[in-house]
Image (cartoon, rainbow, N blue to C red):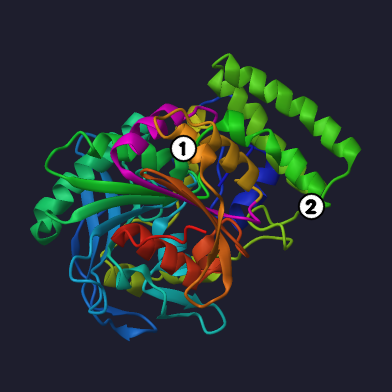
Amino acid sequence: MLFRLALLFSILHFANCQDDFRIAPSDGSVRADKSHVMHPPASFGPVTSLPLYGPIRGVQHSGYVQVNAQFNSNIFYWMVEASESAPANAPLLLWFQGGPGSSSIDVGFFFEHGPFLFDTKNGRPVDNPTSWHHLAHVLYIDQPAGTGFSYTDSNDGFAKTLDDVANDIHTFITLFLKRYPQYAKLDLYVCGESYGGKYVPAISARLGQDASLNLKGLCIADGWSHPPSQLPPYTTVALINGLIDENTKKSYDKVYDQCLTLVEQGKWHDAALLCDPTFWSLRNATGSVNPYDIRAYGNYDFDPIDRYLKRNDTMAAIHANHPFGSTAEQVGQAIHDDFCQSVRPLLASLVERYQVLVYQGQFDLIVTTAGVLDLYWNLPWSGQAAYQRAPRVVWQGTDRAMAGYVKQAANFTLVEVCGAGHMVPLDQPTHAFELIKRFLYNIPWPTH
């Protein structure tokens, strides 16, 4: 989920990549939004049936919550109530995709761990046996405004900082729980992927200030959180996996040194303009390896899901009134100065108060395992020494297959997932289901 360079390459890249970080125009402006439409009144309601699937089992809700009346900013959600097989004390889990501008409906819901996966061959949703709604009430949220089905009627309505993001989500969850008071007293977990490594800490810190919410923990999946740790490993990871040679590494190392200097100087705009396109240039130098999984080349194809979400009957079934994905680019442009900023101080504070799970696919390139390990090894918190001393334990899944490696101390657990790239639930659905179950229900990990 990296930002994109505002060049032809980036425009083509955007058409093929739904879960990447994105960058603003070279002048730093937010382009006028040509995708604004006259929206009918925002609606909400139960989801009882889907095109090409039929009647839905269980309880689902979807629709909009207005988070800013001045700009008519509306956040779209799709709530999946816990199934009958879930524990009686099932919590409420919020899911945030990255981007910025990537849709939780498109990726998390239909591509990773929602109640349906998308059968691309036949162009229809099918049941997902490892859906997380068998563990929790899962609330998939398209945010910031402008993402997926969410929208704003003003350029001023696009989030420009993580504070904007966090405040909008606090407004959203407050109004959502008034609309659905049956979920208001449940334990609450905040989870997200990729740029969710920024969203989740910011949102958790804001929700944690609200005593009416039962925030218990947060989960970050292959998260982009601290550029000083996560930018340098790119070239080394590419080299040791045979994707580039030493000369290419030396060339890109020089550029990343410049990136880090700009970061150290707090020149966030200039840093983003240099650091993000450097990654995509490096990726091109590999022959276009999949940035989310170095075991493959090319990229994931979301077009079949996107076409389904753009159908009029699909939109009607889920109470959507905004052209899907039409303003995603503006989302990335608006918040681009955040790209090279760090949320490490927030992480250090949150791990003192809440249960924190970080899981990481070992074959991810865009958010490397090396960068994530460096971030949390050096995270300054009261449990840092204990974490550094803790053994790295082999995790064998309940299916008796090698699942990954676990390292933990106090409230913090880091899991490296074997055989997975950036989207762990896509590559290892059974093991992803198990690790979330352990996290939500405090099931002990192996200790040796």
Q: Is residue 4 left or right of residue 382?
A: right
SS label for mark 2: loop
Residue 288 percent across, percent down from the top left: 76, 54
Residue at 74%, 55% in the rendered image: 289
Find the distance from the CA under tag 2 to the CA under tag 1.
31 Å
- State which region is magenta: 340-364
Give the farthest residue toward the front.
Answer: 448
Front residue of this view, candidates 159 and 296? 296
Residue 167 percent across, percent down from the top left: 26, 35
Residue 319 percent across, percent down from the top left: 25, 65
Q: Is 47 above or below relative to 379?
A: below
Callout 2 amino acid: Asn
Q: Is residue 78 left or right of residue 356?
A: left
Q: Which residue is mark 1?
A: 386
Q: Note whether residue 357 is visible.
A: yes
- Mark in front: 2 vs 1: 1
Q: Which residue is mark 2?
A: 241
In the image, residue 348 lies in the stretch drawn in magenta: yes
Q: Earlier in the sequence, mark 2 or mark 1?
A: 2
Residue at 82%, 51% in the rendered image: 243
Front residue of this view, candidates 426 and 187? 187
